Image: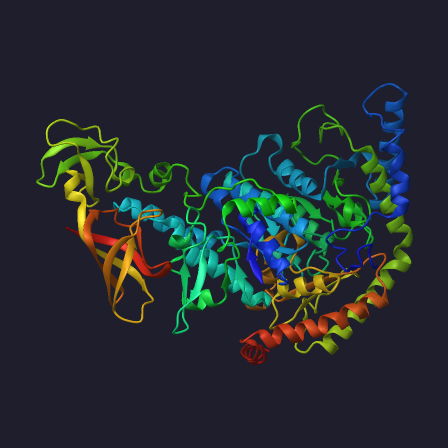
Amino acid sequence: MLVGMSGGVDSSVAVALLLEQGHEVVGATLRLGIAEIHGRPCCGEDGVAEARRVAGLLGVQHTVVDVAEAFEREVVTPFVEEYATGRTPNPCVVCNERVKFAALLARADALGCDFVATGHYARVVTTPAGSRLVARAADRGKDQSYFLYRLSDDALARTLFPLGGMRKPEVRARAGALGLPVAERAESQEVCFADDHVALVAARRPDAVRPGPIETRAGERVGSHAGIARYTVGQRKGLGIGGPGGPWRVIALDAARNVVVVGSPESLLARRFVLRDAVWRASDATARCSAVLRYRARPLPCEARSEGGAVMVTLDEPHEATAPGQSVVLYEDDAVLGGGVLERWEP
Amino acid sequence: MIGMDGTTYLDYSATTPVDPRVVEAMLPYLTERFGNPNSLYRLGREAHAALEDARERVARSINAAAASEVVFMGCGTESDNAAIFGITTANGRDRGHVVVSAFEHHAVLEPAHALAKRGFEVTELKPRPDGTVYPEDLEAVMRDDTVLVSIMHGNNEIGTLQPISELARVAHARGAAFHSDAAQTLGKVDIDVQALGVDAMSFSGHKIYAPKGVGVLYLKRGTPFAPQMLGGGQEARRRSGTQNVAGAVAFARALEIMDEERPTEAPRLAALRDRLVERLLARVEHARLNAADAPERLPHIANFIIPGCEGEAMLLHLDAAGFAVSTGSACSSGSLKPSHVLLSIGLPPELAHGSLRVSLGRWSTEADVDAFIDALTPIVEKLRSMNPLYEKTIAALERGA
């Protein structure tokens, strides 16, 4: 079994649990090349050393997989492009699917490992029809199923999440008892390669931080902005405008015209959401389910319909929309039925 | 040799255990004779005498014209870095042409890449498929503004020896200095820096049964050189920093033992290697020896391609079975890029992924070699049986061959 190790408490405990269960474990740490992106030494390289140390403590073999090229191509470059086109990306979602799990599964094949495992807080459930779905972890506060919704049935058939049934305090206690490090690494909902996404976007796409006008939907100029990459749909603070018509909210980012469009909070209310690059695991083309519009957001009852590569979501009640580029994940009870990247929304 | 943890160690090119005779020689300089060799009182003078004695013994071994041409450094990588940066940037130079071979150790390649970023032009000269850099190939890339040529003496992955004296002549004919990384060859073959005609040569202690953390740069008198470590001006201003006296003593003693034992040890290792190659190729179907046609090679390294098996997978299984070998070089095993050495001699990447390097040393025995092959054979069978592409790989290989 190949276990992704970051050097942090969660993946270290995952390894220990798998060993206790009698599995043969090889640890693997992905080198994402983050130091090269920052231009200074960073957590990524520490993670390799720390994971190697933990592997030594637990007596498991350890290998490093260099995925810097794939990380740049699949995660960092699209991240910058998304911001430059007025969207707000979710890099962890893409990274899990196209970099982390892709690399771990490929490495597992090469090394002759049957399964891969990670320290994510999530579970895998099997449907009556025999397919596998990602599901919420027992620890709701730590649940990471949102970030894993794109994993395929094939991937899930070979994936274990040993922490899925545990709560964080139990994991910490286990780590303490085993003499493992209990320090936290960066949580996976943060963007690990950019403390300040604006600086990264500015360095690669200076056009996305050009100043421009803030306008209403009707085209009335109400202020000026410092570059669309600094804004996200739904944003209320930092607009630098007030006065009549307020309070203002960002309701759209028009990259082609370099305009930040603002409107009233009510103009963000939406019922219909169109998701592209969609994942759909339900047996029928339509399903009653609940939609999670962003990480940690409250699930909203809805009806979802799969249409080609897209999914249309209709909420029972209108709700404040999230930014295009964010993933909307669909759950039936705790199981992930599907999801996709928000393309647009309608009232 | 079977180590204390039961591991059969067959990775002497990665590092060596410190010979007990070397430990004995160096110990006093860690304890009672601990002085700083640059201090004027008796303790300092003792340390200084030991350091200079070590320098002379190293100089004698490599036939340097003067002991002062031996500069002690922190490791082989530092020695390579010092040579590459020190020679090219001497006297304030900030441009020019540099030639390195494409299968150098990263300790040479990375400084060369850094020079390229600073405005130098760098040519990476490919060896031929026999793992040898040919003098006429070097001749073809030399330019009037070539400042430095750096070509390793013996390759760390495939063990091929390079015709250093001819290569140095080619470099000198065009006015360039010549450096050679000899970390893998020191002590294993006769090294006479004057006969080889090099201006600089790099050595590492932990490849010759001295500890990690000591290296040597041979720097021929008169070679332009800008020191890379600045400070108190030790080592005749070529490498500042208080000298590692115990390390230098260990280096000298280790080299002496290598020299004394080479007449019997080199043929013993060559015979052991031949046994390994012969038996492995007989037992493991489709296995190949890399750079098999090399005109000259080190006695202790054999590098194989085992088609249908990934190098790292073999390594992990062999580790579990108690054998230490490597795939690619130890420094690059952190990544899964195929070895740049194997690519440089024309191996396709899919084959280069399946390489295995076995390197023998002072405590290797026939029993080690035989046990290794007995362990490897079922591992290869297992990995191949799990590889869905195995039949295809072999068919493609046979078409290619």
Residue found 91% across the figure and 51% down from its top = B260
Looking at the figure, which quarter contains the N terminus of chain B? bottom right
Q: Is residue B348 visible?
A: no
Where B79 sits versus A16, above or below? above
Say which residue appears at 27% left-offset and 71% top-offset: A284
- Chosen colour scheme: rainbow
Location of residue A230 in the rendering, given as x and y in whole percent from the top left corner: 29, 37
Residue B277, image x and y in percent? 76, 71
Asked if residue A162 is positioned above or below residue B306 in the image, the reply reads above
Quadrant hosting residue B319: bottom right
Quick one: quadrant of the C terminus of chain B? bottom right
Q: Position of residue B242 (x, y in %)?
A: 76, 28
Indicate whether B163 appears above or below A202: below
Which quarter of the figure has residue B337? bottom right
For the residue pair A237 and B313, the one nearer the viewer reads as A237
| Snapshot quadrant of residue B361 | bottom right
Query: How many marks overall?
Result: 0
| Nearer the observer, A286 or A115 | A286
Residue B267 % position (x, y): 86, 63
Front-most of residues A225 and A20? A20
Q: Give B355 or B31, whichever is nearer the viewer.
A: B31
Whether residue B33 can be seen here: yes
Left or right of B335 on screen, residue B247:
right
